[in-house]
Amino acid sequence: MSGELLSLGVSHKTAPIELRERLALTGGQAPEFLGELTGGGQVQEAVAISTCNRTEVYLVGADAVEAETAALGALARLGGIRPTELVPSSVYSLRNCDAARHLFRVCAGLESMIVGEAEVQGQVKRSYETALAARTTGPLTNQLFQAALATGKRARSETGISASRLSVSSVAVALAHEVLDDLAGRRVVVLGTGETGELTARALAGAGAEPTFVANSRRDRALALAGRYGGRATGFDELHAQLRGADMVLASTSSPHPIVGPEEMQAVMGARHDRPLLLVDLAVPRDVDAACRAIPGVTLYDIDDLQAVVQRNRSVREGEAHRVELIIEEEMERFARWLGSLEVLPTITALRERGASIVEQVLADNAGRWEDASPADLARVEAVARAVVQRLLHEPTVRLKRADEERAHARLQVLRELFALEEAPAAQAPTAPPAEVRELRRRSGG
């Protein structure tokens, strides 16, 4: 079945946090979402990526327009909004080569808020594994994500794009340094014990802060982090008391709803006698209600507010970005060759099947003319007939596989017409349109 690769998404570059948090896949929503995408018939393969800075879906569909419409509808239902609210200025839609290149850039860290961040590689890998477990991947998305993850690994091992080990967590702690001056001895409440929470704890420990890890269902994880990085662990039932004594709060849970609301924060600030409190919310959806920003004494930063800090540190890695771009183009050339082979292989298969069917037909037509032939003689005749066809088709097959994209496409058309070959068998992997592959080769200099 032929199909196109399609990617739709929003990121920190195109959409504010208010939209991104509505489209975030939280609490194990991804398998159900992927099942909805592939259950309608317009989408044959699907993988979804959801991080604090992006939600993206990678699809394969026979009709790109129908697949895109289905994906927009699913995203709108996920966010509880009308599809018309997903305006083109917020949602990007990429096809075939452009979609593949974008994912390669995501894995390499070039599309991250922090250029070269390492965490995105693991996030993409886990998203792909989720789709594998949900059985919504297929030949094209499997090849795409394996190639993208290999590209990200090359970018980090062959360049210095991740050398300074900047991350959203480290930038958040740098921001805290700017606001609070010295973090040594500061009491910091850490909401969330996932990957971001641990990275934050590591950065805080290096700065001499005294963290308190607040967790609900993952109390054992909070105890482990407290033992590893110093501080203590507690449950959400003590959150109010912890907020009263804190100098700073760093939030990064996966809760689908705010954990700290304006009423609670108003009460906390009253008990603190308006002693200032810094809150840095790294979660998407947000853990701290935006209305808390208006409460006197509260300074609240969310993930989008960190971009100003990031811009000041951007030059640290941009010198390596060009080298990463070269790696991406090398890997895209490799991916392009694979895409091109998808167009060649079904034709070769059909050609060989046509040769085999001719042998069968000729043998059947002459079945009554071998009265004196033994079974061994008949077997030899059949073997010779099949060998003649195989040798006749061998050289055209080899030359077709070795041809560059332009020549291969032209030869395919001639072969299909000369031998009246049908379309590619349904069992073959989806193919990208030849024009897309040729465009990729042109951009790559191939």
Image (spheres, rainbow, N blue to C red):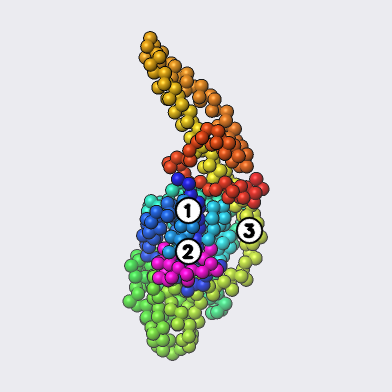
Q: Amino acid at mark 3?
A: Ala
Q: Residue at x 48, y 67 (%)?
A: 52
Q: Are marks 1 and 2 in contact (CB under 8 Å)?
A: no
Q: Is residue 334 visible?
A: yes
Mark 1 or mark 2, which is nearer to you?
Answer: 1
Q: Amino acid at mark 2?
A: Thr
Let me know if residue 87 is in the magenta part.
Answer: yes
Mark 3 and mark 1: Cα distance apart in space:
35 Å
Instruction: Report the residue marked by disc 1.
Output: 63
Task: In this rendered view, identify the residue nearer to me: 35 or 115.
Answer: 35
Q: Residue at x 38, y 16 (%)?
A: 368
Instruction: Indicate the secondary structure of the residue bearing disc 1.
Output: loop
Disc nearer the start of the sequence (3/1):
1
Where residue 379 sits, quadrant-wise, is top left
Relative height, residue 354 to residue 293 (above, below): above
Mark 3 or mark 1, which is nearer to you?
Answer: 1
Instruction: Report the residue marked by disc 2.
Output: 55
Give coordinates of residue 145: x percent, y percent.
Answer: 49, 51
Instruction: Report the residue marked by disc 3.
Output: 321
Disc nearer the start of the sequence (1/2):
2
The magenta segment is: 74-92
Instruction: Specify the farthest residue to the top.
Output: 372
From the image, which quarter does the C terminus lie in?
top right
Disc nearer the start of the sequence (3/2):
2
Mark 1 and mark 2: Cα distance apart in space:
22 Å
